[in-house]
Image (tube, helix red, strand yellow):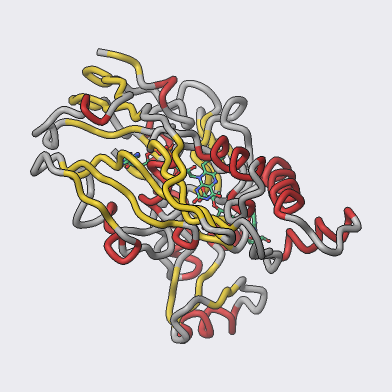
Amino acid sequence: MISLVPYTTFAVQAMAQRILHITDPKQIPFGSKSDALILGGGSNILFLKDYPGIILKNEIKGRQIIHETAEEVIIKFGAGEIWHEVVLWTLAQSYGGLQNLSLIPGTIGAAPIQNIGAYGVEFKEVFYSLEAYSMDSGRYLLMTSEDCRFGYRDSIFKHALKNKVFISSVSLRLTKTKHRIDTAYGAIETALRTRGIVQPTIHDISSVVSSIRKSKLPDPEHLPNAGSFFKNPVVSLAIANEISKQYPELKVYPIADPNKVKLSAAWLIDQCNWKGQRRGTVGVYAKHALILVNYGQATGADVWDLAGAIIRSVQQKFGIELEAEVTLI
Ligand code: FAD
Ligand code: EPU
């Protein structure tokens, strides 16, 4: 048995039978679907108990330009490349597309799983294709955006293909000219104004996003966590209007479906006075109500007990059921 503490950013106490370090797709064991779990950087996972099977730790590296024109470039990355290192490398080549997604922890191979998103941009907007090894058939699938069925913090890898495929490479389509500069997220606009930047470059956007993130998210090295613990709930307009009657300050964000809106889970939890509360080894981060933290020797069950209490109080006050964003094992 081996301790999983160093393998997840939540650093909860749990053990696994064995860890295989996968540096080449050929090492992925065939037919291992029943007892193997794929792990990248462990930044979106919570072990609720010991894991009886084998962990496949994705360490497949590599970067290769597979298509290039004067305007754009398509680059294939080994799925074990670290996301933020990929972001920095693309910025150093002056390729645009990843700037708003700066400083998100984890591997590029896990980015499609929940279609990572931040500061007005989602992964699906830069995605070109991926290769996934089917642990059912032993064959490779080449998947397009349509195949992946990306949604808000969602994809086919959380449903029909859950634990069935090992994503071994991810290709991105990035711009070489006419970069899309996305400053709509309020905090970006404010930060640019403070810095006196009127026409931001992709490097400026990356820099302000990184400093906003550093100012409000805890560094897992110092305070173990997995980022947002819950998804922002998507509800019908009718439900949002009903809640707004009693709570006019309710945070409501439009989404593509005109009949639905996204609410701020952080705001809902904050209204239930959870921010900064501590229960033994776990707690709710003092600067952001959506982040649960491990103060030391916590187990996954300790975290989940706290999450359950939060879910119940938000349900009681607003009638809304929060859903975990973090993968529970
Ligand atoms: P892991 O946690 O190792 O795995 C997550 C899930 O993906 C597991 O189910 C695992 O089995 C599966 N998986 C991993 N790799 C593969 C693969 N190669 N093939 C098949 N399945 C695989 N997320 C955002 O979207 N936006 C944010 O702004 C954001 N901010 C964060 C801030 C902090 C401080 C932290 C700690 C996390 C944050 N996250 C954010 C969550 C996390 O960084 C992302 O979900 C990231 O993509 C997880 O990558 P990982 O390699 O650590 O995945
Ligand atoms: N808010 C509160 N109380 C708090 C914190 C925030 O009321 O304690 C309010 C803020 O006032 C703000 C709103 O909630 O108006 C939204 O807050 P924030 O901008 O921090 O974004 P978020 O909705 O909490 C989402 C993602 C983050 C991503 C940021 C930036 C989800 C579940 N989370 O957080 O992703 O970095 O937007 O785009 O969608 C993650 O997935 O792990 C993650 C960190």
| Ligand 2 in which quarter | bottom right
State left or right for residue 124 relative to residue 275. left
Q: Residue furthest right?
A: 196
Is 112 rendered above or below residue 252?
above
Toward which corner of the image does residue 192 lie, by quadrant?
bottom right
Q: Residue furthest top?
A: 1
Residue 296: where, in percent of width, then height? 52, 22
Residue 150: where, in percent of width, then height? 37, 63
Q: Quadrant of the N terminus?
A: top left
State left or right for residue 10 relative to residue 130. right
Residue 208: where, in percent of width, then height? 75, 50
Give the camera-side residue of 323 and 106.
106
User: What is the total number of numbered labels drawn onto the structure image?
Assistant: 0
Residue 176: where, in percent of width, then height? 61, 56
Give the camera-side residue of 186 and 241.
186
Residue at point 67% right, 45% down? Answer: 213
Q: Quadrant of the C terminus?
A: top left
Residue at point 22% right, 24% down? Answer: 27
Give the camera-side residue of 167 and 179.
179
Is 290 rendered above or below residue 42?
below
State left or right for residue 245 relative to residue 137. right
Residue at point 58% right, 74% down? Answer: 252
Residue at point 63% right, 37% down? Answer: 218
